[in-house]
Image: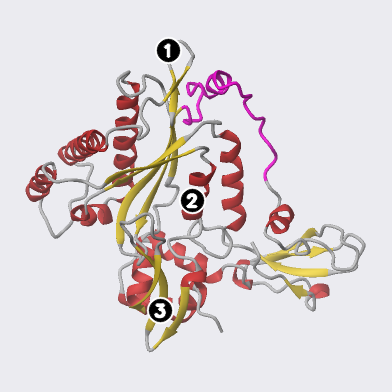
Amino acid sequence: MATTIQTLLKEHFDDFAQRNRLSFDMVRAAVCMRDCRSAALGGHINSCPDGHFDQIAYNSCRHRCCPICNGLPRARWLDGWKHRLLPCPHFHTIFTTPHDLLPLWRYNKGVFADTLFAAAAETLRELLADEKYLGGKVGILAAVHTWSQTLAGHVHLHVLVTAGGLDGDGKWQHAKKSCLLPRKVLMIKFRGKFRAMLLEKLAKGELKVPPSTTPAKLRSLLNLLGRTVWNVKILERYDYGDGVATYLANYLKGGPIGNHRILCERDGRVYFRFRMGNSDRTVPNRQGVTSLTVDEFLGRLLEHVPPRRFQSVRGYGLYSGNQHSHLTEAHAALGSAMPEAESPLSWQEFCEAAGLPDAGRCPKCGKPLVSHDEFERGRSPPRGYRDAVIQGSAA
């Protein structure tokens, strides 16, 4: 049997939870991923409307970290944003926080990420409002990531920003420079804002100080980091934002690692593939294989579970999504119409787009299957359907 996140949790999570202190969010995520699309979550019946075919479909957990059931939510998010993105070039910018601050992040995940979002968004909006660089209101779409390819802590923000903005007269101003902003200027301003915001929250008692340090040592660390170089990148310009939006979508749902990267579990270790970094962007990234003990793997996996109801993707400026965003005016300035809202992608449409056109249809007559007869968690399917086909895990 193939090694997956689900099989690892089924075999090892109970013992792991007894040996380690876990938050409620971690336990909930692990149980959801372990029980996804199994009888533990209940289910329903999909049937042909003409009675040719019946199928037992166990319910998905719908947890954002689950690698099994997030194909459809990911596709819906991406489809919605592809319609909202302005028809103009976009820049992909990355703001990375120093590894010295990882202990602070572990004890303040929500507050830390909120501060990271605010510092990056304010930095971009203030610099790009300056006529020296652009002189307009830009669209910003940001997503926080907290992991590296080996699941170690690596807190950074991916930002999609329009290569132009709407000025005070309602006219579109195109980016004046091929690199959007000077990297050093961007780094210094972001570093200053992020540190100042953290110091203010520390002074107000809004940050939980890690047990390995003290408030005074934490202030000293933040002051010291003000004299170091932070990793802030401005990547090449994309003619359209779809490519970066697709990149973000792959990280928003499904957790920090997909089942396709896991090779096997052997002798108490989990072996998986990872992408090796490469500073030379003309050479493709290489694939490597590494391993962690089962406890290390599960610990790193669950460390990246976001706080419940935490918004890991946020829009600012023209992409803020409120009545003050002026997105309609920006579309008009670019000569395009604001797209009308479309109905969400159905699971049958998703299966067809994924190359599984028969997954949601009767194998005999081809009609779309109809869902009915839901059964509760831990219960068996209705008596008349217990010999029906069990649905696969395409989505």
Q: In whole angstroms, how far apart are the C-alphas of marks 3 and 1?
A: 55 Å
| Residue occupying image coordinates x 78% and y 64% | 358
The amino acid type found where label 1 is placed reads Gly
* Residue that carries the numbered disc 1 in the rendered image: 168
Q: Nearer the viewer, residue 303 or 83?
A: 83
Secondary structure predominantly adopted by residues drawn in magenta: loop
| N-terminal-most mark, 3 or 2 | 2
Residue 126 in the image: x percent, y percent? 31, 25
374 left or right of 245 in image:
right
Q: Quadrant of the C terminus?
A: bottom right
Furthest-bottom residue in this view: 267
| Residue occupying image coordinates x 60% and y 71% | 40
| Residue occupying image coordinates x 52% and y 64% | 67
Quick check: 126 above or below 61?
above
Q: In whole angstroms, how far apart are the C-alphas of marks 2 and 1?
A: 32 Å
| N-terminal-most mark, 2 or 1 | 1
* Residue that carries the numbered disc 2 in the rendered image: 247
Neighbour class for label 1 at 10 Å: few (<14), some, many (≥20)? few
Neighbour class for label 2 at 10 Å: few (<14), some, many (≥20)? few
Q: Is residue 150 magenta?
A: no
Residue 161's image quarter? top left
Q: Which residues are magenta?
A: 318-344
Residue 319 in the image: x percent, y percent? 48, 31
The amino acid type found where label 3 is placed reads Tyr
The amino acid type found where label 2 is placed reads Tyr
Neighbour class for label 3 at 10 Å: few (<14), some, many (≥20)? many
Q: Quadrant of the N terminus?
A: bottom right
In this view, the mark in front (3 or 2): 2
Q: Secondary structure at mark 3?
A: strand
| Residue occupying image coordinates x 64% and y 30% | 339
Quick check: 354 above or below 139?
below
